[in-house]
Amino acid sequence: MPTVNPVSKVPLFGNKGLTANDGFASQAEVLIDARTAADKVGATYMDRPEWIAVHPTTKEAYCSLSNNTARGQSAPLGRSEPLGSDAANPRSPNLMGHIIRWRDADGNPASTRFQWDIFLLAGDPKNPEATKKGSGNKGLAFAQPDKLSFDPRGVLWIQTDSSARTSRSRIGKTSATIKCSLPIPRRATSEDF
């Protein structure tokens, strides 16, 4: 796994979590307004999370972050300053999106600690512009990862959520489905379909 970043899980409700005093009288209210609940406990702002898929063998979780063209441009609710790039959202603005990977400490989903890394930056690996450069191999260019799904072999399938016009203007072509095999040492080998 590339550079990993250890962090802690934060409860949103119940023991040490949010209560009616915080505006959440039940766990149902937390689920209905999870974004505000996460903001209240200081969670990391993420660039438009779309799908989460869990690898069938390793149990690592992968989350597609489609894009955030407002990152660095405007402040999110409850903040006075725009959010710049950070370790989990490394581009500002994030035109192309990326996929982040989480692994529970000791492979235990009940653990309160986990590690994460950027699995894949969407974009064009040949583009010198930092906001449009991707990290896919074989020169594969794609934008705005959306649906993620693992097949029984552990191959990750990525569908993109970019209009033809947007894709052509950002990466010079359109792309809809990408096959991403995960050989040891757990780096993506990508193919366009």
Image (spheres, helix red, strand yellow):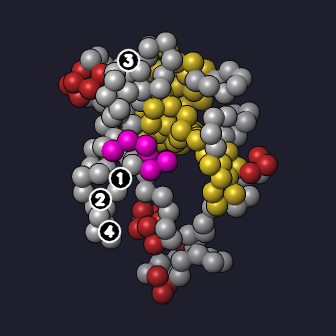
Q: Nearer the viewer, residue 63 or 91?
A: 91
User: Residue at the spot x=49%, y=37% of the render?
Assistant: 99
Residue type for callout 2: Pro
Where does the magenta region start and end? 86-92
The part of the image, by quadrant, that contains residue 56 is top right
Q: CA distance from mark 2 to mark 4?
A: 8 Å
**62 inside magenta stretch:** no
Q: Tell me which residue sits at (43%, 16%) in the image.
A: 140
Say which quadrant the C terminus sits in.
Answer: top left
**Residue at mark 2:** 82
Q: CA distance from mark 1 to mark 3?
A: 24 Å
Q: Amino acid at mark 3?
A: Lys
Q: Earlier in the sequence, mark 1 or mark 3?
A: 1
Q: Which residue carries the number 1 mark? A: 84
Q: Percent position (x, y) of residue 124?
A: 37, 22
Look at label 1 and name its amino acid: Gly
**Number of marks in the image?**
4
Asked if disc 1 and disc 2 are in contact, CB closer than 8 Å, the reply is yes
Mark identifier at residue 126: 3
Q: CA distance from mark 1 to mark 2?
A: 6 Å
Label 3 to label 4, Cα distance in Å? 36 Å
